[in-house]
Image (cartoon, rainbow, N blue to C red):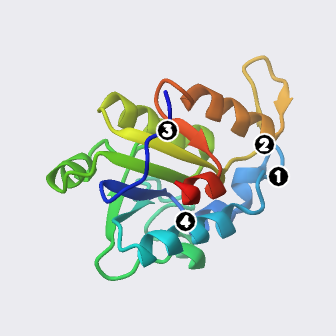
Amino acid sequence: MAPPQIDDQTALVLIDVQKSIDEPVWAMDGPRNNEDGEANLARLLDAWRRAERPVVHVRHDSTNPESPYSPEKPSHGFKDEVIPLAGELVVGKKTNSAFIGTGLEQHLRDRRLTRLVIAGVITNNSVEATVRMAGNLGFDTIVAADACWTFAKRDWSGTLRTAQEVHDMALANMDGEYAGVLTTDAVLGR
């Protein structure tokens, strides 16, 4: 699947880019990858805003009061690099996919937005779940690979995988069948 061209029918969808992601609980098995992730998110967001194209901020609203993503926690807020502006849609979700239990799909369809550029965290969790569903729902989807990140994790056999390995496998899972995977520079060049 060739990644779609970016035009006025393309929305930028930022997944769970909240202060919560900086909490130590996520790095229990090892550090994150892609220290440039926030800078790349900011570049994408700036380009979308300058072009006056649609932006969607997805916010995880955990129902677990102990989660860093709980609305009751100070870490629930968006990271400084991606604070929504007036007029930009904020979608609260309670599951890993931004399409489940939200009005996101209807919002996109009502505005005839058929293409999505998706970025954010965690690559192998909410990003991958949202991308898979976007592809299954028929949206032409691009993942901005270097505007996403994840953390080290043990695989099913107990082998510790680095954050980069986990990230790369998640991208491989999405690429071709559900989305095209590009760098931020490649997205901005389209």
Residue at mark 3 to residue at mark 2: CA–CA distance = 25 Å
Residue with the mark numbered 2:
163
Q: Which comes sooner in the sequence, label 4 or label 2?
A: 4
Q: Are marks 1 and 2 in contact (CB under 8 Å)?
A: yes
Mark 3 against mark 2, which lies toward the viewer? 3
Q: Are marks 3 and 2 in contact (CB under 8 Å)?
A: no
- Report which quarter residue 99 is drawn in: top left
Residue at mark 4 to residue at mark 2: CA–CA distance = 23 Å
Residue 148, x across and y down, in percent: 63, 52
- Report which quarter residue 166 is drawn in: top right
Residue 110, x across and y down, in percent: 14, 53
Residue type (three-letter) at the residue carrying disc 1: Pro
Mark 1 Cα within 10 Å, few/some/many (few <14, many 20+)?
some
Mark 2 Cα within 10 Å, few/some/many (few <14, many 20+)?
many
Q: Which comes sooner in the sequence, label 3 or label 2?
A: 3
User: Element under label 1?
Assistant: loop
Residue with the mark numbered 3:
3
